[in-house]
Amino acid sequence: MGKVIVLASGKGGTGKSTVSVGLAVALVKLNKKVLLVDCDSGMRGVDLMLGVEKELIYDVSDAVGGGCDKSAAIYVTQNIYGLYMMPAALSADDEVSPSVLKELINEIKHEYDYIIIDSPAGTGSGFEAAAAAADRALIVINPEPTSVRGCLNIRRKLTEMGIDDARLVINRFWPERFRAMGIYHDIDDLIDTAQTQLIAIIPEDVQIAAIAQRGESGQKSVPSMEAFRNLAARIEGFNPPLAKKILGI
Ligand code: ADP
Ligand code: MG
């Protein structure tokens, strides 16, 4: 039975979609069959990141509303063999409800090793729908206070929803800037403030958008890929060290 992971953040733009894609690609490289579901209705972007935007006809709202067969809203990505995606609705008016999305995910999860759900920022109804079927959550923050506060809000909401398995992903980490900001004493101070167990630190990486476009061949040259490989290994239950060399910490 596939494990269902929701990507969340209290604040917008922390990198949920980017981390969803990086994690999905890294899990596929571990020979896992992965479905990436975009639940950010009205702001969909995973299709663009995976280069499938021109093929799309149906989306998640059609799949739950009976507008198409479920399988018709699932697209094969050309570059990454083993990675499938379901796009979000184009219009925010077509947001799906938590119960119907949960039902859909429960119906299809036996076909995958992992279902990764990319959610809209915040704790609103879109996030509730995205998280409804999740076994665990990854909360994506940037190393700054408003983002950390957003993490605490998400934790509260997850607890209300009965999801206790939440881990912290620190994204866009850049050691020199982190030190120069002078807000947190060190990484442990940041993690303590977020009150959430760390699972990954993803470095600031100007090439990060290329992860899904490079397909099988070029990924080694994307600096953040090592961090995504470590994240995928941790999700699989292994315990690799954090990418300390890249991060310089
Ligand atoms: P969200 O889904 O949380 O709104 P996105 O994944 O769309 O955030 O990312 C927001 C922006 O930040 C994008 O332009 C993306 O390329 C950039 N970005 C995300 N993570 C990183 C990173 N580790 N290094 C550099 N840029 C990043
Ligand atoms: Mg997004």
Image: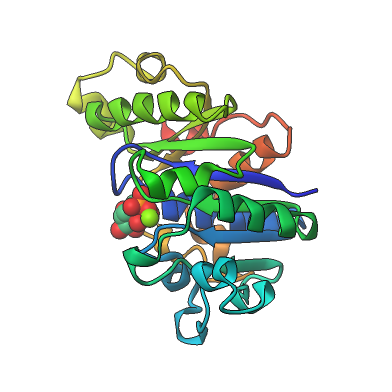
Q: Position of residue 238 (x, y in %)?
A: 73, 32
Q: Position of residue 64 (x, y in %)?
A: 57, 65
Q: Residue at x 45, y 35 (%)?
A: 139
- Location of the C terminus (image quadrant): top left
Q: Residue at x 37, y 72 (%)?
A: 90
Q: Position of residue 98 (x, y in %)?
A: 51, 48
Q: Is residue 7 left or right of residue 94?
A: right
Q: Is residue 183 left or right of residue 109?
A: left
Q: Is residue 192 left or right of residue 149?
A: right
Residue 116 versus residue 218: which sits nearer the camera?
116
The answer to whether residue 175 is above or below residue 81 is above
Q: How many marks?
A: 0
Q: Residue at x 65, y 46 (%)?
A: 4
The answer to whether residue 168 is above or below residue 121 is above
The answer to whether residue 35 is above or below residue 177 is below
Residue 224 visible in the shown view: no
Q: Residue at x 57, y 55 (%)?
A: 101
